[in-house]
Image: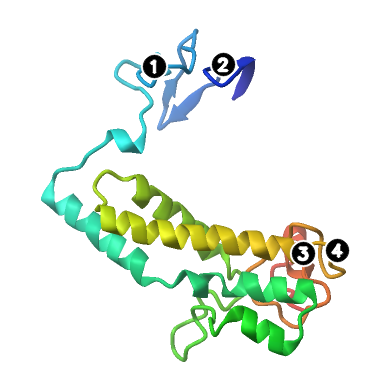
Amino acid sequence: MRGKIARIGKRSIAMALTGVLTISGLTIRPASVAKAAGAQSDRVVSSVKGMYQFDMTDVVVTDTYYDNSLQKEIAYLEKLDENRLLAGFKETAAYAKGMTDAERTAFLNGATRYGTEKNTGNWENSLIGGHTLGHYLSAISQAIVNPGTKAADKQKLQTKLDNIIDTLKECQEYSKKSSACKEGYIFGATLLNHTSDLEFQFDNNEKGNLSKVS
């Protein structure tokens, strides 16, 4: 999809979009002229009748089955400890900063990756550890803006979200002037003793050497 920005300002952004979306043989083409993004009521309407863009906040689900499902999901999100999902990122940041063992232990504040317990599977304690946090960020962000989420739950999830963002920012700060990684680097997987070259596993992944761990 290509877009041309006609004007950028605090009030509106006008864009002309071109693109084709094909779903199960159905070709969807956008309208020839896109509306300027101004008032909230303005929508970019496709040439397929009845299709338009809307925000999650525009949708309220009243069916009891789906509402029950949402509440169970929120309860699960609140149950997960974001500090355990952040443990791998904090460990990497500690090595990037050059912390001592005592300093690293204090920085982690007792948090361990999910999957370190016996018979729980690897989960976050593996070569792909850290990726769960991305899914978690999406889930709690969507739950916060969902009209079906209770105010008290929104606040709990917002606190978790703020903690995650603040911690990841702190981890990135520790990568500055590091000899073990580039500035801004964050990583949540098991390090496999490559604490002086924190980008080793990431570089391996980009090269397709997924089975090479040392």
- Residue position for label 1: 42
Say whether marks 3 and 1 touch (CB < 8 Å).
Answer: no
Query: Where is residue 44 drawn, in percent x and y?
Result: 43, 18
Whole-angstrom CA distance, mark 3 to mark 1, is 43 Å
101 relative position to 105: left or right: right
SS category of the residue bearing label 4: loop
Whole-angstrom CA distance, mark 2 to mark 1, is 13 Å
Q: Amino acid at mark 2?
A: Met
Q: Nearer the viewer, residue 26 or 166?
A: 166
Q: Amino acid at mark 1?
A: Asp
Mark 3 residue crowding within 10 angstroms, few (<14) / some (14–19) / many (20+)? many
Q: Is residue 178 above or below residue 138?
A: below
- Residue position for label 3: 175
Q: Mark 2 or 4 closer to N-term?
A: 2
Whole-angstrom CA distance, mark 3 to mark 2, is 38 Å
Mark 4 residue crowding within 10 angstroms, few (<14) / some (14–19) / many (20+)? few
Which of the labelled discs sits on residue 177, or is there none? 4
Whole-angstrom CA distance, mark 3 to mark 4, is 6 Å
> Residue at position x 43%, y 21% from top?
28
> Residue at position x 29%, y 33% from top?
58
Query: Looking at the image, how many numbered discs can be counted on the residues?
Result: 4
Q: Amino acid at mark 3?
A: Ser
Say whether marks 3 and 4 touch (CB < 8 Å).
Answer: no
Q: Nearer the viewer, residue 136 or 165?
A: 165
